[in-house]
Amino acid sequence: MNVPITSLPRLVIIGGGFAGIALAEKLKNKDLQVVMIDKHNYHTFQPLLYQVATGGLEPDSIAFPLRKIIKNIPNFYFRLTEVLSVDTENNEIDSTIGKLKYDYLVIATGSKTNYFGNTSIEKYSMAMKNVPQSLNLRSLIIENFEEALLTSNLEERNALMNFVIVGGGPTGVELAGALAELKKGILPKDYPDLDIRQMQINIVEGSDRLLNSMSPRASKKSEDFLVDLGVNIWNNVQIKNYDGYCVETNSDVSFKSSTVIWAAGVKGSTINGLNDECIIERANRIVVDEFNKVVGYDNIFAIGDVSCMSTDVYPKGHPMMAQPALQQGKLLAKNIVAILANKPMKPFVYKDKGSMATIGRNKAVVDLKKIRFQGVFAWFVWMFIHLISLVGFRNKIVVFFNWFYNYVFFDRETRLIIRPFKKKNKESF
Amino acid sequence: MNVPITSLPRLVIIGGGFAGIALAEKLKNKDLQVVMIDKHNYHTFQPLLYQVATGGLEPDSIAFPLRKIIKNIPNFYFRLTEVLSVDTENNEIDSTIGKLKYDYLVIATGSKTNYFGNTSIEKYSMAMKNVPQSLNLRSLIIENFEEALLTSNLEERNALMNFVIVGGGPTGVELAGALAELKKGILPKDYPDLDIRQMQINIVEGSDRLLNSMSPRASKKSEDFLVDLGVNIWNNVQIKNYDGYCVETNSDVSFKSSTVIWAAGVKGSTINGLNDECIIERANRIVVDEFNKVVGYDNIFAIGDVSCMSTDVYPKGHPMMAQPALQQGKLLAKNIVAILANKPMKPFVYKDKGSMATIGRNKAVVDLKKIRFQGVFAWFVWMFIHLISLVGFRNKIVVFFNWFYNYVFFDRETRLIIRPFKKKNKESF
């Protein structure tokens, strides 16, 4: 890989997500050469991907060019490539554009969809972990309705208008709410010659309540909100199989659906070449100590979703969301500076700022440390927090304006099939 | 095709471009069933495609859902499909989703890139006639620089940074200007480890001046603006061949370039099944009379780019741009209402409102009927006209804000490779 060799120690960061950019920003102008590697040239604000998928936001307003984040910084390099493996003996990574030596390596590769080994579900269901996937889902949703118009086979038409969301976490709940609002305000106008009342939105959750990482009150309220919006909630149900048409579960419930959206789990995006002992099998995360150092190595760190730091409060590792990633990235920057100065590192302590989910217009649930609330105010808080967290001033304004517009006009204007989605091949053309 | 049969006469419009939507909007609530067919579910504002290709605007802000334009109108139907052919004997069209009878047919299929039979150029060059093509070009431009970073072969690196725009009409001129602004303000910051001065932007025009449909003064001024921005202008040069690397011309000039953008001509997107006599071979346009009626038929019309109405002022047909399309669409609506009421039709007279092109920040040229001007004021006029012509209030605001942001911050923030572009297969994945 073509990166200049200097006398400075080289830190390589793999991944420009929340963890990677939090780390990189704090390492500006330190006595280090920093190389960031990512397979995309942009940072993705994942919490809003569901709004891209449902036509509420344009994809470009939740993405931000990584080169812009790190511009004008001496000793800072970005390379657009995919890492193939790490050779820890020789302190070297291998990528699609060649090898690169490192002095320190930070793995911030995030997470990917976890199908728990079910290849049939992986083949036929839709995921929503990055921008292209969300755009594929957006195309598919609209194409389903265009197709439903054309068939006189009632069963086929119903399957096209039947959406099954697997997983009742924030992603599933927010997507279900957004689909319900499409059903209510947009689709009846767009398809006056279809009976949109036949559209079904199902959310299937394996545990006994939606949002089970939040308070019971938040779960209850979000379920009420979704029922009000006409969403069918199936708690205590697990999807067993999906062949592109029939959805089988572990109970009597079954669905005939053209569209299954898999939001039931994520796993770490680890890289090849690490010791087997430092990978937790099921969640595919990398075990780190309290300084985010990968066990068994001295100069390799892992932060964010891909890392698993077992603590008293979180024995199975911190939740795989933005906050731990940001906080770990920031602290690791300080600790790396400490290492270089031969000073002691600080252990990571997660400050849980709470969690929240939005269900729709004026409907959100917020659990903070000391206070929990739901409804209109929660919805404004949700919007405010997401706006200030978005990277980039332009993005903030464009997203704000789109939300304002959608709120006032009950609209979602980016319902565009820019690249149609081929169901059979699961790709866009 | 699944469209209800009513007692009303059925008018089928093929194409939701400027001509098609101008016609459709004026036919709201008339005693007609109107069916619009398009292969995209959105209207594209083509004059701003070059800004999508150069990272200045997000694609979703220059596209507008066709179903939203025609919503809530009784007797109005939209179908997302591609027309295969027309059977004029049986008054029927055939499409990828089946056949449809018509009483009146309006062909508003616009134009496509004209390679004048050169398959090699068609294979290796980029076009910019629709949103996916513009997004492919955006990806390719950024990928070129990412690739240029990696090679130590100087010749290869220069070819990656050498852009050849073929065609000195408004599209070519505006794209050249936008690339020059990327070179000036953005790329040196994004790629501090590349010598961006080596980037070359060439515009190649077969005639003796750029913008040769405008006044000589506009041509002169646009050439001055482009030279100021560092663009190389090659008038009186024609591209003969391109193999993906070498560009051959009819003169001594040649280029080594990874990126040739073909903006040298368009031709009508006609449909199969019409009489050979009504198609003009070279421009592939459909000959119409002064009422936009296709010669040889009583109930088939053609409007916009695809139609060729020979007049004293325009013996070879009107210019293939938005204004004639809009005006023909509006008049045809009146004429169809006249036909239904057994009243005489009005012949089409083109009102030339002038033409304009923008070269960059504070730099544009405007030719109106009585007045011609260039520079800052022309640039504001250009922006104002384009903003008010954009379909959709949301689009206007988002585009306006992006322009304001780009102006104030000298930025282009949508430089994202959402879907990488595979050069060899000419498709995105």
Image (spheres, coloured by chain):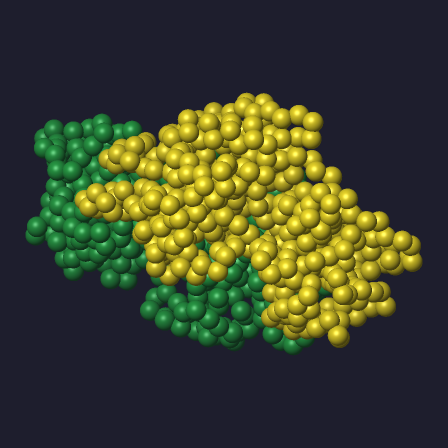
Chain colours: A yellow, B green
Give the number of callouts. 0
The spot of residue B363 in percent (x, y) is 58, 45
- Residue at the spot 66% in from the left edge and 34% down from the top edge: A354
Q: Is residue B331 left or right of residue A12?
A: left
| In-front residue for pair A113/B379 | A113
| In-front residue for pair A233/A146 | A233
| In-front residue for pair A231/A280 | A280
- Residue at the spot 58% in from the left edge and 58% down from the top edge: A282
Name of the residue lying farthest toward the right: A342
Residue B194 to residue B366: above or below: below
Q: Is residue A292 something one can see in this rendering? A: yes
Name of the residue lying farthest toward the front: A251
The spot of residue A196 in percent (x, y) is 30, 34
| In-front residue for pair A74/A220 | A220
Q: Is residue B354 something one can see in this rendering? A: no
Q: Is residue B242 left or right of residue A71?
A: left
In terms of image quadrants, where is residue A79?
bottom right
- Residue at the spot 55% in from the left edge and 52% down from the top edge: A266
Name of the residue lying farthest toward the left: B89
Name of the residue lying farthest toward the top: A376
Residue B74 to residue A280: above or below: above
- Residue at the spot 26% in from the left edge and 34% down from the top edge: A195
Q: Is residue B319 left or right of residue B191?
A: left
In terms of image quadrants, where is residue B425?
bottom left
Q: Is residue A25 left or right of residue B417?
A: right
Residue A55 to residue A423: above or below: above
The spot of residue A224 in percent (x, y) is 46, 27
The spot of residue B335 in percent (x, y) is 19, 34
In terms of image quadrants, where is residue B153?
bottom right
